[in-house]
Amino acid sequence: MTTNLQERVTLNNGAKMPWLGLGVFRVEEGAELVEAVKTAIKQGYRSIDTAAIYENEGGVGEGIIQGLQESGLKREELFVTSKVWNADLSYEGTIRAYEQSLEKLGLEYLDLYLIHWPVEGKYKEAWRALEYLYEEGRVKSIGVSNFQIHHLEDLLKDAKVKPVINQVEYHPRLTQTELQAFCEQHQIQLEAWSPLMNGQILEHDLIKELAGSYQKTPAQIVIRWDLQNGVVTIPKSTKAHRLAENADVFDFQLSAEDMEQIDQLNENHRIGPDPDNFDF
Ligand code: NDP
């Protein structure tokens, strides 16, 4: 049972990743971004999730440096994730992309580097590059994003290093139970992107009703549901009061019945692209 914002899950390589982190998709470079990352760190967040394609690694890095300075933390106390974009998925391209991300972030290593999307015919070559970076000690952990079961099966056939994480769209309308079971069986930790369904699920009657009965907010109910389902989660906000709200999920517990009710909202409904049918 997760009890605080700094609590970590041990990944299959022994590295420890915070259960709850900050996502920064669709946040442009600039003061709002730097402030959000810095504020999150000061509030106790220890995990930040970005990607090359978000084109905001510069500001994320600045926020990290300021956040570390102002809270007197060491780099090792943070867990920073980025992702290699589809255009760079060759072996050399992936290594180059990693170096570029580090440079933009102003960091010497990442805690986690992910293949962003399972582009057919390319992701295995990219995985070999991630394995190289991992074996060289350039990155602490490597993983994937948006991989379906068949992508994982294919990857695992030749992988020397197993992915530690599969970061996928996950919220009460898309509970991914088969994928989660497969990942558990292979010691791959599931991580939720768009855990709040980009805000949409917060308007659902059941979620609002549960918020009332637990005296928490709809976002807190959904984030708590992730954690109790054993899913790492990275809700995005740039607003200080929402960062605090989203992190205030450790003083209550959803009952088994209420967990089940939320699970029942599943409709296998995606708000983002389908990993089996995307064209970017
Ligand atoms: P989320 O489900 O986290 O929802 C974010 C939206 O909800 C924003 O509009 C935010 O607004 C709003 N919000 C946040 N907290 C609250 C709150 N307490 N009450 C009401 N509204 C709230 O969506 P994301 O798509 O951003 O997903 C999270 C992260 O996952 C991304 O930032 C990114 O890091 C990662 N991701 C990864 C993908 C992948 O392919 N691997 C794809 C998509 C996302 P505001 O900022 O104004 O507070």
Image: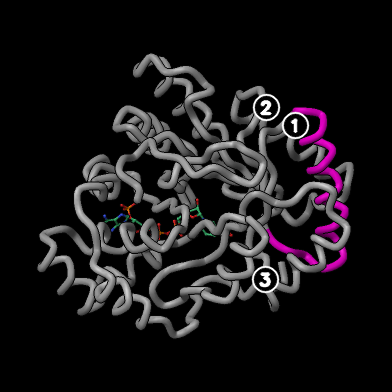
Q: Is residue 232 found left or right of 179 in the rendered image?
A: left
- Ligand 1 closer than 8 Å to label 1 CB: no
Contact flag, marks 3 and 2 (Cβ < 8 Å): no
The mark found on residue 273 in the picture is: none
Contact flag, marks 3 and 1 (Cβ < 8 Å): no
Q: Is residue 153 found left or right of 61 in the rendered image?
A: right
- Residue at 88%, 58% (x, y): give it: 158
Instruction: Write down the region rendered in magenta.
Output: 117-137
By secondary structure, the bulk of the magenta-drawn segment is best described as helix
Disc 2 packing (10 Å; few <14; some 14–19; many ≥20):
some
Q: Is residue 176 found left or right of 148 in the rendered image?
A: left
Residue 13: percent from left, percent from top: 67, 41
Residue 40 vs residue 77, the one in the foreground: 77
Return the disc, 3 or 1, that comes first in the chain's sequence: 1
The mark found on residue 99 in the picture is: 1
235 lies above or below 148:
above
The mark found on residue 148 in the picture is: 3
Q: Is residue 120 magenta?
A: yes
Q: Amino acid at mark 3?
A: Gln
Image-quarter location of ligand 1:
bottom left
Disc 1 packing (10 Å; few <14; some 14–19; many ≥20):
some
Q: Secondary structure at mark 2?
A: helix
Residue 57: percent from left, percent from top: 57, 37
Q: CA distance from mark 3 to mark 1?
A: 27 Å
Residue 192 vs residue 116, the one in the foreground: 192
Q: Secondary structure at mark 1?
A: helix
Contact flag, marks 2 and 1 (Cβ < 8 Å): yes
